[in-house]
Image: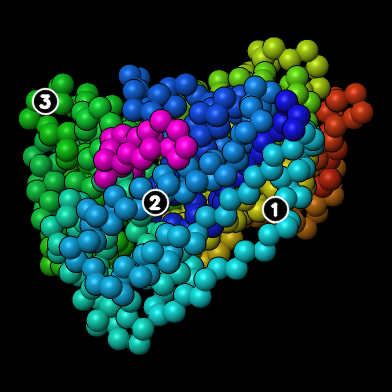
Amino acid sequence: MPSKQTFQFTLGPVQGFVAQARRTRDFWAGSFILSWLSSVAMAAITAQRGEISFPVPDKDYLNWLHGNGDSPPPLQGSVPNRFKALTAEVPADFQPQLVTESVQAAWRALADCVWRNDLAEIADERTHTIWERQVENFWEISWVLSADEGANLLDRRKNWRNPVAPSEPGHKCMMMDGWQELSGVLVSNMNEVNQFWERLIASGKPGMQTDLRKGEQLCALAFIKRRFSRWFDQVQVPLPGGDQTIHGWRLPSAVPSVSFLAAAHWIAEAIEKAPLPAFEQFAAAARQLSSYSEAAHVGGDAFEIDILCVRDAARRRQQQEPGFRRLWAGLDGQLYFPTALQNPRLFDDQQGAGKVLKALKELRSAADMPGLPSPYYAILLMDGDQLGSHMGEKAKQGPISRALNNFTAQAGDLVRKHNGFLVYAGGDDVLALLPLEDALPAAADLQACYKGCFDNCDIDKEEVRVTSTLSAAIEFVHIRTPLTRVLRDAHRLLDDVAKDETGRDAVAVRVWKPSGLAAQWSMPWAKALDAKGEVLICQLAEQFARQQGSEEAHFSSKFFFRAEQLVERFPDMPDDALQQLLLAEYLHSFGSRSSKLKDEQLQDLKDSLALLNAQSTRWQRRLASDGSAHFSAHGHNPQAALLVRFLADKGMERDS
């Protein structure tokens, strides 16, 4: 056997586990568990004196994995699920199966911990049978050990297998498609199914009443995702074939809901403006209807996962008025939306919901905030461009790994700076949820950070820096839209639009209204940003938002619909001519007031129309043989105007 071998390992199904989610915490949990299991595989390799070249394991993460962490504990997944271990020092008796056994043992220990704490005293044999079948048959693990360092060995190995999922009878899980829910009821007897889950909700287990909603039924896999964080610090499992023990650690039991994210800036403004009695009255009414389910985002616990603008507003208000309780800012995010309060499926106590609705109206009045929070938030998905083309060269793997680790270490702070919640950042992948107004600026900062990490890495070859760029997909979504569907679409938007159609190093955006797709826009980063790295289409939206309601407003909502129609009718019109046409439409829609425009106002208008015109252009990026980027224009995108209107109005319809 050769002294130097290549070991490749992958764990899946990634999207099958992560993307199927009903809540934000389900996204987070799937990513965290997958990352933790991947780190267990790394530990099993290093235990056999393997040297992992990509990705370079994060030392702080591995310290927590081995139970001796002294830095802040990892709260998000940060270990990519697919990596290569170069084993130059691996002895001839290296045992790849021990890596597989270690991952399965860690998964088993996690599942057993949830079962022991939550279900053992309640479940019958039917539930236990389902649990064992699903826990034992979910993960697909592939590995290759070879003297050949070919990057496609693992892909060839995976083609040998054609796993067949076990048959799943009975009622199905509401989170993970096709898997049987845990009650074990095989006939169409929903009363018996509901009785099982209602008994579980009423069991008195910590957090069960908030972790499970009435009418929700889950399979073993979904139940582990939903409940593992309550018991993760109890997990301990020895690595097979060695003397190392794998540990869990304390995790937050809640992450921000999509409704809380959507309302975050509105909540922060209310905290700043509302008189203390109005906020106290609203919090008292809300407490009777729901819990402090968002308390971790404004609390003082060392493990808070915060939304920055709300947390800071709560802290400032408490400093100014000690009578203000920070927990008042940690209420269930749905309580700020009248449509949610009026929905008996969300709040069956409609009398109590009516009291909250009245208190919310009084809070808005007292704070002089006539508007409601936007019901839209953003899903941000980012992925590196062409990185795999460089990973076949051994000399590049170490520097690339260090650049990626540097990026991963900064990604969380960048997302939090923009009032977002980081679901996952590992390698060249990022998944985050943000308020609507913060998504595009956050994506711009992240791609700049990614480029900076590669600009500063110790790789001699210039093409690595040139091609190591980060593309983004942003989905603006209504809070009632199913998460799983949107995340799947985000992957298509990233791959098909940002990368294939626009040419990578680009951003692509979709706006989803309850009625369906409302707008799609994409742009290479080089054309989307100004010289300071700020997002140009956001600047245009801010101009529009500031002018709303002004007698001298440059734009109205109707103008943007007319602009869309004009661009759609003349998609290939030269820029100068299109700009003149838009100017004529504006002057017509502005009526007699257009004659009163001053010279500087008219120039500002022309500048704004030029910016709208530029951001409507369909640019495509292509790399030349020398690595330089070239851009070609292919007509205009009429939906850019609708995106500007959406960003300016934050999804709230206006007729102005």
Amino acid type at image mark 1: Lys
Dot 2 or dot 1, earlier in sequence: 2
Q: Is residue 289 left or right of residue 642?
A: left
Q: Is label 3 or label 1 in front? A: 1
Magenta span: 231-258
Residue 108 image label: 2
Residue underneath mark 1:
158
Indicate the position of residue 428 as horizontal and vertical percent values: 61, 33
Dot 3 or dot 1, earlier in sequence: 1
Is residue 172 part of the magenta span, yes or no?
no
Magenta stretch: helix, strand or loop mostly? loop
The residue tagged with tag 3: helix, strand or loop?
Answer: loop
Q: CA distance from mark 2 to mark 1?
A: 23 Å
Q: Residue furthest right?
A: 625
The residue shown at (26%, 46%) is 230
The residue tagged with tag 1: helix, strand or loop?
Answer: helix
- Asked if marks 3 and 1 touch (Cβ < 8 Å), the reply is no
The residue shown at (35%, 48%) is 110
Q: CA distance from mark 3 to mark 1?
A: 61 Å
Residue underneath mark 3:
321
State which quadrant residue 299 falls in: top left
Q: Is label 3 or label 2 in front? A: 2
